[in-house]
Amino acid sequence: MVIKSDCSPYNFVPETKIKVKVMIKLNFNTKRNLVLGVVGLSIAIFIYAFTTAGGKEINQNAGMAALPVEVALPVHENITEWDEYTGRFEASSRVEVRARVSGFLEKVNFEDGQHVDKGQVLFVIDQRPFKIALDEAQANYAQTAASLQTAQDNFVRVESLRETGALSIEEYDRRKQALVHAEASIQLAQAMVDNAKLNLEFTKVKAPISGLVSRDRVNEGNIIDGGSANSTLLTTIVATSPIHFYFTGSESDYLRYVRLARNGERGEARSEGLPVFIKLLDEEEFAHEAKMDFVDNEIDHNSGTIESRAVLENKDHLLEPGMFGKAKLLGSAEHDAVMIPDEIIGTNQSMRFVYTLNDKNKVVSKTVTLGPLHSNGLRIVREGISSEDKVIVNNIQKIRPGMVVNPSQVAIEGETNSLTTVAQAH
């Protein structure tokens, strides 16, 4: 309120003072209300943010608890384990054909890649020099035989004179030595004849085994070397029926097989011809049956492995030396096993785990020790879970230990490695 006065000029001063006091009081009240308002607004915002965050967390937990998953009991069966190894086929026999005499290659008697029989003539070397050498050896033999006859006659004559004393001891010994020399000469001459005949025979290079022949490495009209380790390679022959399959196993595998054999749970690999089943790279099944016929006599000190061999018939010549294959052989006695699909197994560094469900529908992580894949396509679990555990088989990436989930029961079918829904649980 402002008081106005017209009596005195001094009345203007009180009027101004009163107006200032009122304005100061008004400004003070406004600032206090503003501060109180700001404080109240801050408290309201904090409470709103806290309640909103809590609500979101509750909603998230509710959403996670409601996540549907499928659970199944592991497959529990009495099985026999099979171990698998990768190996390579090799010919049961392989020969590098080389000439045993040197000379001019006159003829090639086979088509590249054909099947040849043992003893079949493959190459012919010019025989004329060797026939001449044989004639020379035979002539020398005839001369030596004549010399032997003369020495025998001379010795017979002096042998009767020795008894009468009409012949000196020196002459008798000389003729006896001449006979011995002639006999040795005839043996040498005979050896030269035999050698010449053999060289003449070697001019026909024959197949030492039956099998598939490679191409001719040397064509007609070339001079070849023979009779040494560095002789000219003419061709190769491989025998592919039967054919061998070589593979290697670890030292631990070898020890396991030996102990199984000693316990009567598996046959002896070296003596009992254990069955081996082989599949090729383009095959799904182990369709080729073989028998193990060889285990090496020592562990390789570089690789720590031991080599084994299986032999199988190859009458249709489908299998070729150098081809790769995969073999499986008996790896254990019959025993109860727990098996699960391979794709539900998780990895945490070096550990393997699976998610299971407890009685309160909470996710539990269990570390497992794994074995090999079984023939039904499921992974054998050595330790970590039992046949009563409910393993989670889907939404593996969305769940974590401790989460509450909404499970539905399914069954694991081993043969097709698939899952079939059998019930719904809430």
Image (cartoon, grey):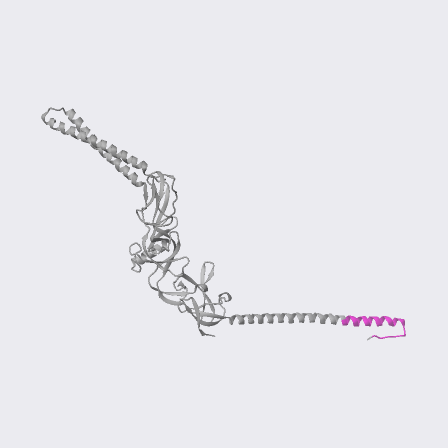
Q: Is residue 79 above or below residue 304?
A: below
**Left or right: 405 as drawn, with respect to 243:** right
Task: Report the span colored magenta.
Answer: 2-26
- Residue 262's quadrant in the figure? bottom left
In this view of the protein, can residue 152 be seen by the observer? yes
Give whichever of 163, 3 is nearer the camera.
163
Give whichever of 35, 376 is nearer the camera.
376
Give whichever of 235, 291 is nearer the camera.
235
- Residue 188's quadrant in the figure? top left
Q: Is residue 188 above or below residue 290?
A: above
Across and down, in percent, residue 208 comes to 31, 46
Q: Is residue 131 above or below residue 56?
A: above
Residue 320 in the magenta stretch? The answer is no
Give the prevailing secondary structure in the magenta stretch. helix
Residue 7 in the magenta stretch? The answer is yes
Across and down, in percent, residue 132 comes to 30, 35
Across and down, in percent, residue 161 comes to 11, 26
Residue at the location (85% across, 70% down)? 13
Residue at the location (16% across, 27% down)? 173
